[in-house]
Amino acid sequence: MIVVSYPNIGEYERIVYNFLNKIIDNSNCKILRPEKNNKKILELGEENSPTNVCTPFKYTLGSMINSLNKGANVIIQIGGGCRFGYYAQIQEKILKKDMGYKFEFINLYNGNKLEFFTAVKKVKMLNPRLSLQKLLKEIYFTIKLLRFSDNILTYIRENECYIEDKEKLQSIKNNILNDMLKIKNISEINLKRKECEEEIDTLIVEKDDVLKIGIVGELYSLMDPFSSSFLENDLLKKGYKIKRYTTASYLLLDKNKSEKKLLKDSKQYLKYKIGADGTESVAHTLELIDEGYDGVIHIKPFGCTPEINAMPILKKISDDYSFPIMFYTFDTLNSDTGFQTRVEAFIDMLEMRKK
Amino acid sequence: MRYYVGIDIGSISTKGVVIDENNNIVASDYIWTNASPIDASKRLINSLIKKSKKEWLENIYAIGTTGSARKLIGKIIGATSIKNEITAHAVGTISKYPDVSTIIEIGGQDSKIIIIKNSVVIDYAMNTLCAAGTGAFLSSQAKRLGIEVEQMQNYYEKSNNPAKIAARCTVFAESDMIHKAQIGYKKEDLIAGLCNAIVENYTNNFIRGRRIEDKIVFQGGVSRNNGVVESFKSKLNKDIHVDKDSHLLGALGIALIAKSESRGERISLNIKDIEYRIREKECKGCSNNCEVVYIYEDEELLDTIGNRCENCKSNI
C-alpha cells in the first residue's frame, strides 16, 4: 500500500490533497494529509537541518519527518527559484542517509526546472494506470481551483476590514476551505465563486479612515501563518486593511509573465532581477505607495538571500518617499513577544502619522 | 485632582511613576527586576503606595503598563492601558521635550532609536535577536570586573587610554576584554573601552543611514552611566540631553497614554500579596496550537496570554 504525503504550506495543502485524490488509485494508495505547521514540526525540522539553512527548509523537513513517522512511504516535494531549488535534494539525503528512513522520494523538479514529462513519469508511480489525458484534465481543474481559492481569499483579505459580521465571514471562509478539499469539477467552482462573491458583497460596509498596510517579503513566511507568528490574522483581527500580492497562483502561474513589467515599473531602483521574490518586494512596495497605503511590513526568514538583496533598496525607497517600512526576520523563534512589540509600535507610528 | 500610574516592567529594572493631572511626576521608584517581574511589581507598587499621599491613591483614574512584562503584570493588576515600550518612550519624551527629534534609548536587553518630526514618530528601529550593546552587557561585564554597574562612570572619568574593544558581538567583546585585561590594561581603561563599545555598537546598528538631528535625548537605564553619555557626545559630536528622570520616561509615557485612554472611572492601585502561578502550555483546543501562558491567582485561573481564541480556557 502506498501512503503518499507532502510538506505543508498554509492552506494550500488542501488543494494538493484534492488533486492527488483524483489521480491516485484508491485500491492501493492512500493520502496522508500533513499536519498544519506547529511547534513540534518546527522542532523536528530544526533538529535535523543544517543550522544556517533558511527557515522554510526546516518547516518542510519537519513536516516530512512528521508524516514519515505517521506511516507515509512516498513523499512529494518541489523546488525552484532560489535555494529552494536544492531543498528536495538535500532533504532526500537527510531523510534517507542521515535518518535512515526508507521511502520513495518524488522530486517533481529537476534542479530549477519543471520538466513536464519527467514529472509525469514520477507521478505515474502513484498510479501506473493514470492516463495522460486524465492527468492533464486534473491539472487544468487544479489550476482553476487554485485561482478560485486565491482570488476569493485575497478579495476577503482586502475587504475584511469593511465587514462587521465576523461570524458570517468566518463561516464563508470555512466553506471555502472545505471546498478546497472536496470540490469536484469546474462548473461547481464557477457556481461557488459567484455565490461567495455575492455573499461577501452583501456584508461589506464601506468606511473611511482604515489603516492600510501592505505585507511583502519571502513567500513561505507570507503564505504560511504559523511561520510568521500569525501576523496577517492578527492585523486583520484589529481591523486594518491588508494587501499581499504573493499567492501560490501568482508564483506558479503569473510570475513569469509579470516579472518584466515589475522590473519596468521599478526601473528607478532595479536594473535586473534580484532573485526569487526580491524583485516583487521592491516593485510591490512601489505599487503600494502609489495606491496610498500607510505602511509596509517586510518579512523574511533568516538567511533568505533574495530578500536580503531587496532590503537596502527598500530602505532607499523608504527614505525617498518618507514611507514607513518595517523589517522583520523570522527564525525558529519560540516567543512572539518581540515581534508583536515591534508590530504594535509600527502601527502606533502609522496611526500617529495619519493623524 | 486626578492621578495616573505608569509602570514599566523591563528585563533588568522595573520602574513606576504616579503623575498628577498636569503630568508632573509626584512619586516614583526604580528597582531591579531580578528576573521575577511579579515580585518586582509587588515591591514597586508597595513602594509607590508608601510614597503617595492617601488623597492621591483615592483618586487614581488609570493605570498603564509597558515593558517586556507588560501583558503579564497588566493582567494581574488590572491595568487600563497596556502598550509597547517604543510608543511609551516616545510619548514620555515628547511630553518633556516637545522639540526632540532623536531619542536614543538603551535599556536592559534592548536598544532603540526613535526619530521624531513635529512631535510625531516617523521612524524607529530596535535591536534584533541579541543583547549586544545593551545594559545587560554592561552589567555582566561589571560583575566580571568586580564592580557595581553604578560605579562604572567613576572609572570612566579616570581613564586616559581607553582599551579598544570589539563592539559587534557580546561574545567577541568579552574575549577582547579578557585579553586586554590579561595584557595589563587598567580597570578604568577597560571600563572606558566598554562604554565606547556600547556607543560603537549603537552607531553601527542604528545610526548608519539615518540623519541624526538636534535635539537628541538619551534615556533608558544606561543613560544613567555618564561614561556612555560622554562617549556618545564625542562620537556624534553633538549635544546629548539626559533628563533627570531619564530612566523613568517609559513609565511616564505609559502613564500619559493611560491618562489619555482613561474612561473616567476610579481604579485602585494594588497587587494582592498572594502567590501568582504561571504555567506555559501548548493548547490543543484547535489547530493553531498556541503557546498559552495561564496566570493563576492562587488556584483560580485569572487570565491567559498568547491565545488566539477562547478555546484554551475550557481546555486546560
Image (cartoon, coloured by chain):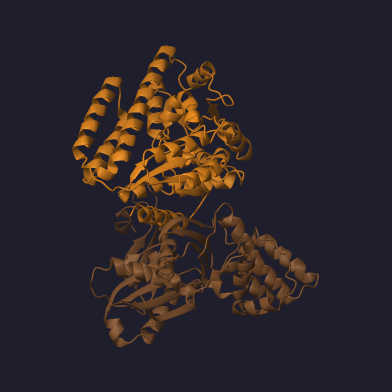
Q: Classify residue B147 by image quadrant.
A: bottom right
Depth check: give the residue in front, B209 or B223.
B209
Q: Is residue B181 visible?
A: yes
Q: How many numbered marks appear? A: 0
Q: Which chain is orange?
A: A
A157 or A124, nearer to the observer: A157
Q: How far across and down, in percent of the image, does residue A255 sit?
A: 46, 27
| Chain in brown colour | B
B279 is higher (above) or lower (below) than B52: above
Residue pushed farthest left?
A202
**Side (left or right) of A221 relative to B54:** right
Left or right of A142, for residue B147: right
Q: Residue at x 34, y 59 (%)?
A: B316
Q: Quick one: which residue is furthest to the right in this view? A: B183
Q: Please state if B184 lies on the left or on the right of A173 as rendered.
A: right
Decide which of B105, B22 is in the foreground and name it.
Answer: B22
Q: Estimate the x, y position of residue A189 in percent, counting from the top left.
A: 28, 25
Q: Which quarter of the figure is the C terminus of chain A placed in? A: bottom left
What's the residue at 53%, 63% (across, down)?
A: B110
In the image, residue A203 sits, relative to residue B192, either above or below, namely above
Say if residue A71 shows up in the picture.
no
Residue A24, how many percent across, how many down? Answer: 41, 22
Q: Quick check: A113 above or below B251?
A: above
